[in-house]
Amino acid sequence: MAEKITERRKFQRIPLTEIAIDVSDGTGFFMGAVYDISRFGLCMKDMPIKLKGDAGQMTVIVAGRGGRFRMNVKPRWSTRDRQKKSVGAEILDAPWGWTEFVMKFEPAANGEAQRESAG
């Protein structure tokens, strides 16, 4: 089922590590990590159960890999296990530089950069 959803995405999600995220759901402030990103969305993991995954809007600060971005997101789904929660969100207002940051990690961009440096 996840493959069908992925196939419909215009911009594929890119798995990334070493990116921290600070999230406010309007009632609390929480820390977690990014699981993957795209130009218009991201998946947050290791979030506390207290985070409201059904909040209408959240403010996030994404920091790591040479970038720091503050943006508003709209949660689209959430899952939880016993101790942590993951939330997938649509980015509502990406700041200048976000698309450029994401493009550095997109497979096509990496392939082009490798070809340019080889030739």
Image: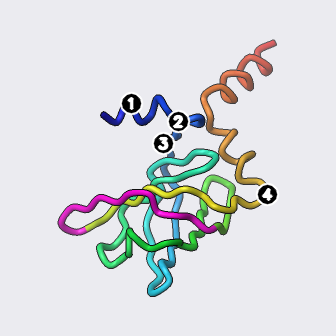
To which residue does mark 2 refer? 9
Mark 1 is on which residue type?
Lys
Which quarter of the image is occupied by the N terminus?
Answer: top left
Give the Cα distance between marks 3 and 4.
21 Å
Q: Which residues are magenta?
A: 72-83
Residue 99 located within the stretch drawn in magenta = no
Q: Which residue is mark 4?
A: 96
> Which residue corresponds to mark 1?
4
Name the amino acid type tagged 4. Answer: Trp
Marks 1,4: beta carbons within 8 A: no
Residue at 26 percent across and 62 percent down: it is 80
Give the image location of residue 9, x and y in percent: 53, 36
Q: Label 2 is placed on what type of residue?
A: Arg
Q: Amino acid at mark 3?
A: Pro
Residue 15, numbered circle: 3
Residue 64 falls left or right of residue 49? right
Which is in the foreground here, disc 3 or disc 1?
A: 1
Q: Say whether residue 79 is magenta.
A: yes
- Give the Cα separation between the discs numbered 1 and 4: 31 Å
Residue 99 on image: x %, y % = 72, 47
- Residue lying farthest to the top in this orientation: 119
